[in-house]
Amino acid sequence: MSQASNTPSDAQKAGSGSNGGRVQGLLVVTGADHPGILDDISHYVAERRAAIEAVRVVNLSGRFALLMLVSSEEPGLGAIGQDLGLLMERTGIRASLEAAHDTNGGEGAATSFSLSAVGGGDADESMTLRQTSNLLRVLNINIRDVETRRTTGGGFDMSMKVDVPRDVPVGKLRELLGQLLGQQPVQWELAAEPVESR
């Protein structure tokens, strides 16, 4: 069984984010999906006196990928990185602890939108995804989340969460999306996401 990718010094570097005097790290886990894996990981984190701040999990074709933001005093975060070999050997997953970047530094610099597209059986899912992602890249629009799936009729659904910079006119973005997605039998919608209350 391969050992954890974090040396002690790497684990300390991973805790570059801060939260009320605590350091943060991003636990990245991949592997074959099976019942109990989240329980194993959360128990591993709790044993090292760390707190789980946020979790994202995606499952595709029997494999899963998990992102877990954890926080702790520095010794606890270091233990998470140093002991990953034990977790991997026990569960059969692959895991690493990476630096957690401050997500508040650019707050207000972009507006979150939801972009959805539905294509019929004659629509090309791969082309739609590729061309849409290329357009967003050219406009410096970050794709925060994306999900596609085939529908029973042979078509597809695509949904994206994107962050549109303030210097990108939303009207122009809609125009360009219309020109691009109008080339295929695709219905699409761009809508601002609700602002979360604090």
Image (tube, rainbow, N blue to C red):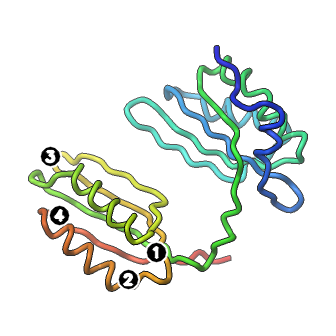
Q: Earlier in the sequence, mark 2 or mark 4?
A: 2
Residue on which disc 1 sits: 164
Secondary structure of the residue carrying tag 1 is strand
Q: Earlier in the sequence, mark 3 or mark 2?
A: 3
Closer to the eye: label 3 or 2: 2
> How many discs mark residues in the rendered view?
4
Secondary structure of the residue carrying tag 3 is loop
Q: Earlier in the sequence, mark 2 or mark 1?
A: 1
Q: Residue at x 46, y 57 (%)?
A: 145
The amino acid type of the residue labelled 3 equals: Gly
Query: Which label belongs to residue 186?
Result: 4
Q: Earlier in the sequence, mark 3 or mark 1?
A: 3
The amino acid type of the residue labelled 4 equals: Val
Q: Quadrant of residue 2?
A: top right
* Viewer-proximal residue among 50 and 106: 106
Residue on which disc 2 sits: 170
Residue on which disc 3 sits: 154
Task: For marks 2 and 4, give the CA distance.
Answer: 20 Å
The amino acid type of the residue labelled 2 equals: Val
Task: For marks 2 and 1, give the CA distance.
Answer: 8 Å
| Residue 57 pos. (x, y %) | 53, 44
Secondary structure of the residue carrying tag 2 is helix
